[in-house]
Each structure stands twice: as structure tokens, then as C-alpha cells.
Image (cartoon, grey):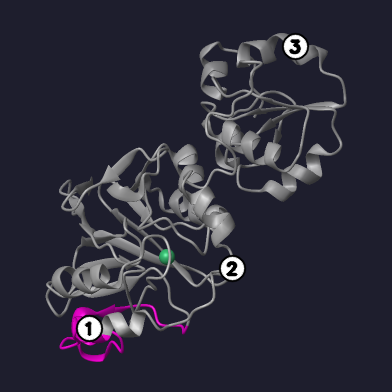
Amino acid sequence: MNNNKKSSFVFRQLFDKDTGTFTYLMFDSDTMEGLIIDPVKEQFDRSLQFIEELGVELKYVIDTHVHADHVTSSCMLRDATGAKSAFGETSAVQCADLLLSDGDELEFGRFKLKAISTPGHTDACTSFYTEGRLFTGDSLLIRGCGRTDFQQGDPEKLFNSITQKLYAYPDSTLVYPGHDYLGRTASCIREEKSFNSRICSGQTLEKFVQIMNNLNLPKPKRIDEAVPQNMKCGYSLELGHVNEDNFTMHDLHQMLDKLNPTEKVIDVRMPSEYNQGHVPGSLNIPMGNEQAFIDEIRGYDRVFLHCHSGRRAQTVYTMLSMQGLENLVCINSSGMADWQQAAFPVEQ
Ligand SMILES: [Fe+2]
């Protein structure tokens, strides 16, 4: 038996075709610690499925910036996996666990992801480097760059970020952007220095500023909805919106026998967790499937939501409340962990 298991860097590129957004999942195959960059809310199920199937222990959920075109699933993945959420320092995203400064490094297994402050598209735009790859968000795109006409955008800052920071990496460094709308998936620094139509090497600041100030682009379709939600890590409602009943799994246990047919316990954990043991009579609707919740919940007068520790239940509760659903009891300060600890009956 060879016990010297060798770490290797595992990398997956995912795509959301509605918004042309790339999401990047990477991990150390030895420790299984990993991180995800720019996950999309509508693709939460797919992201979590990859993380679970591959057995990734997610340490960080990272957004390259406060997006204007899609909503992040940062909070949902954080709640589902226990990962820490991270944004660039000047984003002022208050619910983020980490605000990253230029040069900060996030470790996952034996690998490190380095934050590179690249303002210009927005003021808090952050690119990342690891293992010969640059994740450039909307700063440097394939043969283009992010627009600079909203969210404190500044063409001069973007010019400096790209030419002084990103183009300082070796020519062979791969470039993985935040978006592409033409089916291209990756580039490299040499290619962009040679062929980027807005900012190849040799481009002058004056010419670049002139190009960027005359793009006359329409306002992004989802900006009014996306930016406020992204400032809350993707939550739809105010953070800290909690069920005031302060209902626990012990309360649930006490009344389990007395539930009538119009009351239901819903377990929002993943099916694999549910199958290992759940509250007798509970129904499994994993977090992320809002429509299934809405369809199912309609038939009940009262629904008790729980997960393992309470975080996912709180996320689901917040989302369902936003949809106008009432009669929800959120068990957000405890969960299946307490149920098992108390040795309450479990169904398999
Ligand atoms: Fe953007």
C-alpha cells in the first residue's frame, strides 16, 4: 500500500447559459479541500451536486465582484456546506465572512488562491491566481474587458489593473474570465496581450479610456434586482430575518405525535443526509428547489422546516417568506444534530 497519496489540483469550469457566467470549482484531491468562484443562484443545485458527488470539503465561496447581471449563490452554498463567503475588501458586503485585500491568500489543501485587487469594472473587483490560472472576473475578458460605466466603474483604474497586474503574469498563464457570450472558455496572457481588441499590449491609456467611454451599452437587465441581493450574499431579504418563535427540535419532538394531517415536517438537507436518518414522517425537499417547496407547502396549514444545524432551514425560510408563503415554522437554532444527540426516534 502506498500511503504517500499525492495531491493534485482538480479543476472544473461550469457555465450558466442564461447569463453567460462561468463558475469555477477547484480542490486538492488529497485533502479534498476546495473552493468555488462566482456561483450562480439559479445553478445552486448543480453546484452543490458537484461538490457532493466529488466529495469536496468546500472552504470558500468567492465572488470576484458584486455582479450586476446575476445573483450569487454565495449564501446558499455557505449555508449548505459551512464554507466561508468572500468578496473584495471595498465591496462593503456586510454579510461576507471575509473581505479580501490585495495579496491575501486562501489555502485549500496544499494549494493557495491569491487575491489580486483589480478595480475598474467595479471598485471592488478582485481577480485570483492559482496553479498557472488567473480568474479575472469581469476585469479581463477573452478579447475584451468589463464595462466601466456603472458601480464605480473607472476606465483608468481598469487599464492599470490589466496592464500592470494581470499582464505582469507570465505569458503562458491561463485566463479564465467571469463571462463569455461567444462560446470561448479560456485564454492566456500572451493571447490577450496580442489580440485583445480593447487592451492589447501597446494600447495607450488615452485610447482605452476613449473606447470605454463610448461603448453606449444598455443598462444590464437585472442590475436593479441583482446588485441589492448580491450586497447581501444573494439573500432575498434582510439578513437576520429570523423566526421569532425560537422553535427548537426539542419543541418539535414534544409535539410530533400531536401533528394533524395538515401539518408537516420538512427536512431541507440533501437526500443522502435524509436517507441516513430523519424525523419520523418528515418529507425531504432539499434546499435549492423553491418551486417544489411552493407546490408541496400549498397543501398544508403549517410546515416545520429543519436541516442539520438550522442554517439551511433559515435560508429556505427566508426565500419562502419572500415568495409570500406563511405558516412556516423555521427551526433555525437547532436541527438534526440536536435530534440525534437527544436520541429521539429516527426513521431510515
Ligand atoms: Fe460584472
Label 1 secondary element: helix
The magenta stretch is 182-207
Q: Which residue is denoted by mark 3 in the rendering?
A: 255
- Residue appearing at x 84%, y 39% in the figure: 298
Discs 2/1, front: 1
Q: Badge 2: how crowded within 10 Å, few (<14), some, or many (20+)?
A: few
Q: Which residue is denoted by mark 2 in the rendering?
A: 221
Displayed quadrant of residue 322: top right
Numbered label tally: 3
> In this view of the protein, can residue 226 be seen by the observer?
yes
Q: Which callout, 2 or 1, points at the residue further toward the start of the chain?
A: 1
Label 3 secondary element: helix
Q: Does the magenta run of residues contain 187?
A: yes
Q: Which callout, 2 or 3, points at the residue further toward the start of the chain?
A: 2
- Which mark, residue 206? 1
Q: Badge 3: how crowded within 10 Å, few (<14), some, or many (20+)?
A: few
Indicate the position of residue 119 as horizontal and vertical percent values. 27, 62
Vertical relation: 277 (above or below) 8? above
Label 2 secondary element: loop
- Residue appearing at x 58%, y 63% in the figure: 222
Discs 3/1, front: 1
Ligand 1 within 8 Å of the CB at mark 1 = no
Q: Amino acid at mark 1?
A: Glu
Q: Nearer the viewer, residue 245 or 225?
A: 225
